[in-house]
Image (cartoon, rainbow, N blue to C red):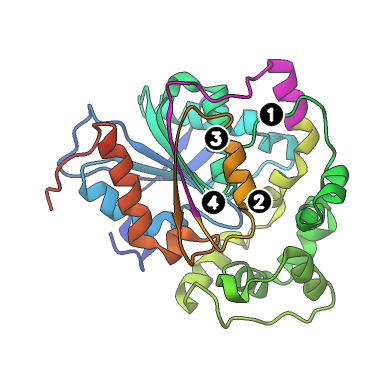
Amino acid sequence: MNPTDPQTFSHRTAQISTGRLYHFIDQVPSNYDPTQPPLVCLHGFPDSWFGWRYQIGPWCRQGFRVIVPDMLGYGETDMPHDSSAYSPKNICNDISALLDFLAIPKAVVIGHDWGSYMAGRFALWHPDRLIALVMLSIPYVPPKEQYVSLEELVRAYPSYGYQMYFASESSTSEIEANLVPFLASAFRTPEKALSWSKLNELITNKQINFTDDCLLNERELQFYVSRFQRGMRGPLSYYRTTKTRFEEEKEAQLPVHLPPNLPVLFLYGTKDVTCPPSAVRNAHKFISRLNTVAIEDVGHWVMLQAQDRVALEVLRFLSSLGLSQQSRM
């Protein structure tokens, strides 16, 4: 596995029982012990399986099978047109079906950004499939008792204004027409990061052209561009599920607390504006076995800015649960 070359990873596709076609990385170590649970990594927006490229190798070399899907709407995975297909219930059912396809009863699920949100919801929709949970950058938020529209949310928290833009139909074509600068800006360092509302303004006024200060090199950026060239409708649809996910969770009467026996690790960068300290403190109210690790001077893209630290902290967490293996490199 060479993190600079996507083709050096083990690619697979599967038609799962929910009817979706999923593309995923299935990296099986040569010394694989099937009694050890695999690690299933869920990416966020705007990302792909490639976002985990620096962690797949280290985890695999420690004997863990690492499975990393392109999430629904991304890469070579199916892209339904209807935004309701991207609700957490449907995504979690897909992940469970992928485990079924691979004959995996239980796994350690690791998520970043939207993937972190989905990982937390997976613990509610399919608690029997989890051995442990790792969430990166986006802390756990419980299901709401009352519906709060996106408009109400943004009025209360103006910094979430970008979600209104992503939820709008106009964002799809505007971002598709400015894909390179959009991605280059999305993967910026904390010091140079733009608010999504500012990014929206620059896109709309065609004043955006930044490739400097991007966390991706030119080759990586072009790989991401190639992954998104078939369209942004799927990735943006996650932001268009606010009411659907509330209704599904309300109907199912999902609990607000994660299972009390579930070990959870939360990793975040101290310069990540999407992860205020208050949100981290609040998560402790709903998770009995929560460990938090703050990574200093790092922003939202922890897997890129703290490549080795993320890999190491997850291995330490797994070791504390008696799951790690001695390296056999």
Q: Label 1 to label 4, Cα distance in Å?
A: 18 Å
Query: What number is the disc on residue 137?
Result: 4
Residue type pointed to by label 3: His
Q: Quadrant of residue 174?
A: bottom right
**Label 2: element kind:** helix
Q: Circle 1 sits on which residue?
A: 143
Question: Is residue 73 among the parts visible in the rendering?
Answer: no
Which marked residue is nearer to the observer: mark 1 or mark 3? Answer: 3
Q: Label 3 to label 4, Cα distance in Å?
A: 15 Å
Question: Is residue 271 among the parts visible in the rendering?
Answer: yes
Q: Label 2 to label 3, Cα distance in Å?
A: 29 Å
**Picture residue at 58% right of the left edge, 47% below the top:** 138
Q: Circle 2 sits on which residue?
A: 235
**Label 3: element kind:** loop
Asked if marks 1 and 4 touch (Cβ < 8 Å), the reply is: no
Image x and y of residue 81, in percent:
73, 43
Residue type pointed to by label 2: Pro
Q: Is residue 265 magenta?
A: yes
Which marked residue is nearer to the observer: mark 4 or mark 2? Answer: 4
Q: Is residue 226 above or below residue 254?
A: below
Q: Earlier in the sequence, mark 1 or mark 3?
A: 1
Q: Quadrant of residue 188?
A: bottom right
Residue type pointed to by label 1: Pro
Crowding at dot 1, Cα within 10 Å, few <14 / some 14-19 / many 20+, comes out as some
Q: Label 1 to label 3, Cα distance in Å?
A: 15 Å
Image x and y of residue 158, in percent:
82, 56
Q: Earlier in the sequence, mark 1 or mark 2?
A: 1
**Label 1: element kind:** loop
Image x and y of residue 304, in percent:
44, 64
Q: Label 1 to label 2, Cα distance in Å?
A: 22 Å
